[in-house]
Amino acid sequence: MIHLDLFSGTGGFAKGFIEAGYSFDTHYFSEVNKFAIANYQYNFKHAQYVGKIEEIDTKELQKPDLITFGFPCQDLSMAGSRTGLSGKRSGLFFEAIRLIKAFKPRVFIFENVKGLCSTNEGRDFEIVLKEIANLGL
């Protein structure tokens, strides 16, 4: 399986799949926090760092079978700014959608915080659902 882990943090998705008995022939990850990157590389020796999500060139990677992501939620979180998808961090959701559209993986898994359902009076959640529905997968 080829896995692309976006907004990877320290590797929760990857660890979960490995613990469940899956293995990766190729394992890519994208993250911006230098401490999370170092931790990821320590825990997943064969994972290939592909840089910031905005800089991922789809022509340079093998087509992933699996894309996982939980995009930065500070703009959505009940404890955050509540600027929603128009926020600098949470707006990166659209970069994940760009990559899913380009790669058309067999599976993608997305998780986020409760606040997604209520930012901008629920309109952000509607946008996310429409974007996912419009993927045509």
Image (spheres, rainbow, N blue to C red):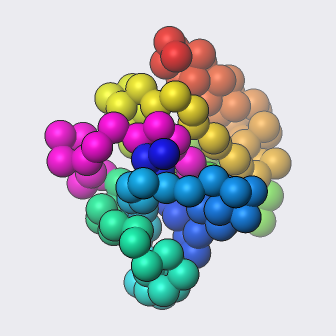
Q: Is residue 73 magenta?
A: no
In this rendering, the count of numbered labels is: 0
Q: Is residue 94 above or below residue 135?
A: below
Q: What stretch is highlighted in magenta?
A: 54-69
Return the residue nearer the eye: 47 or 126.
47
Q: Residue at x 39, y 55 (%)?
A: 26
Q: In this orientation, does residue 64 appear?
A: yes
Image position, residue 82 (x, y; %) = 67, 53
Q: In this orientation, does residue 6 appear?
A: no
Image position, residue 127 (x, y; %) = 60, 25
Q: Residue at x 75, y 31 (%)?
A: 122
Q: Is residue 54 above or below residue 40?
A: above
Q: In this view, does 86 lie above or below 53?
A: above
Question: In the figure, is residue 88 to the left or right of 81?
Answer: left
Q: Which residue is drawn at 18% across and 40% down?
A: 59
Image position, residue 104 (x, y; %) = 42, 26
